[in-house]
C-alpha cells in the first residue's frame, strides 16, 4: 500500500506542498491549519502545487502546527459536514461516540499532523503556531523573503463558526470531550503531535 495515497479518496495526498523555483522554501499543507488562507497568498507570488515525495523537492519547509484537540474538533466538524451532513442526530448515542473516539482519525482533517511531515528535514523547517497571530506572523515572514502581501485580503475559509452545520457538529463533539475518557483517548492518539509541538521553536515567539 502506498502511504501517500492513504486519503486520496478523501481528496488529499500526503506530501502536498506549495513551492516556486525562485525560493528555497516550500509550504507544507496540513489540512485545518489555515491552508485555505495561506495558499492564495503564495499563489499571488506564483507558487504552485507539488508533492515533495513524488517531485523530490529538497527545500526548507514552512509548517503550521495547531493544538491537536482544537484541530480535531474543527476537523471532525468538517468531516461530518462533508460526508454525513444529513445524518440523524438522534443516532448520536453512547455507542456511536465510543466508536468515534476509538477510531479518532477518519480523514485528512482528523489525522495526526506528523503524518503530513513524513520524510522532511525538520531541523531546517520554519514553524508557525496556528492562532490569532498567525496571519500577521506569516505575512511578516513573507515580507522578509521579499514577498510583501496584504494579508487581510483573504479570510479564513471552512471555519466552523462561520458554518451552522460545521458549528453544530463541532459543538456536539466539544461537549463529549468534557468526559475525561474521550479527551484522554484523543490526547493519546495525538501524542506524536504534542511531542513535536513541545520541541519546536515557533516563528515570532
Image (cartoon, helix red, strand yellow):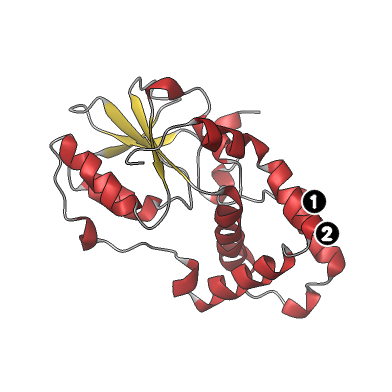
Picture residue at 21% right of the left edge, 61% below the top: 153
Picture residue at 56% right of the left edge, 56% below the top: 70
Q: Which residue matches tag 1? A: 102
Q: Quadrant of residue 96?
A: bottom right
The answer, for residue 95, to whether it is visible in the render is yes
Q: Quadrant of residue 113?
A: top right
Q: Answer above or below: position of 171 versus 1.
A: below
Near-viewer residue (87 or 204): 204
Please tell me the numbered disc located at residue 98: 2
- Tell me residue 13's x, y (percent): 50, 39
Marks 2 and 1, Cα distance to the nearest angstrom?
A: 6 Å
Q: Residues within 10 Å of mark 1 (few under 14, many from 20)?
A: few
Marks 2,1: beta carbons within 8 A: yes
Near-viewer residue (32 or 20): 32
Picture residue at 25% right of the left edge, 24% below the top: 24
How many numbered marks are there?
Answer: 2
Q: Residues within 10 Å of mark 2 (few under 14, many from 20)?
A: few
**In the picture provided, is 185 more to the left or to the right than 201?**
right
The answer, for residue 46, to whether it is visible in the render is no
- Tell me residue 16's x, y (percent): 43, 37
Near-viewer residue (176 or 200): 200
- Quadrant (top left, top right, bottom left, bottom right) of the N terminus: top right
Picture residue at 65% right of the left edge, 66% below the top: 174
- Tell me residue 121's x, y (percent): 44, 20
Q: Answer above or below: position of 170 versus 107.
A: below
Amino acid at each position: 500500500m502506498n502511504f501517500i495515497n492513504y486519503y486520496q479518496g478523501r481528496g488529499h495526498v500526503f506530501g502536498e506542498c506549495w513551492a516556486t523555483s525562485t525560493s528555497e522554501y516550500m509550504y507544507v499543507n496540513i489540512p485545518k491549519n489555515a491552508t485555505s488562507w495561506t495558499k492564495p497568498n503564495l499563489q499571488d507570488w506564483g507558487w504552485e502545487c507539488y508533492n515533495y515525495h513524488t517531485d523530490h523537492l529538497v527545500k526548507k519547509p514552512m509548517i503550521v502546527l495547531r493544538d491537536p484537540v482544537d484541530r480535531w474538533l474543527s476537523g471532525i466538524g468538517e468531516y461530518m459536514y462533508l460526508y454525513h451532513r444529513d445524518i440523524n442526530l438522534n443516532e448520536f448515542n453512547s455507542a456511536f461516540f465510543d466508536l468515534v473516539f476509538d477510531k479518532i482519525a477518519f480523514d485528512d482533517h482528523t489525522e495526526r499532523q506528523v503524518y503530513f511531515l513524513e520524510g522532511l528535514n525538520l531541523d531546517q523547517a520554519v514553524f508557525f503556531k496556528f492562532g490569532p497571530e498567525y496571519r500577521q506572523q506569516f505575512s511578516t515572514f513573507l515580507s522578509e523573503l521579499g514577498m510583501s502581501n496584504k494579508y487581510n485580503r483573504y479570510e479564513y475559509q471552512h471555519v466552523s463558526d462561520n458554518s451552522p452545520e460545521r458549528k453544530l457538529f463541532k459543538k456536539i463533539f466539544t461537549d463529549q470531550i468534557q468526559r475525561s475518557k474521550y479527551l484522554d483517548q484523543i490526547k493519546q492518539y495525538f501524542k506524536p503531535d504534542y511531542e513535536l509541538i513541545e520541541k519546536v521553536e515557533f516563528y515570532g515567539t
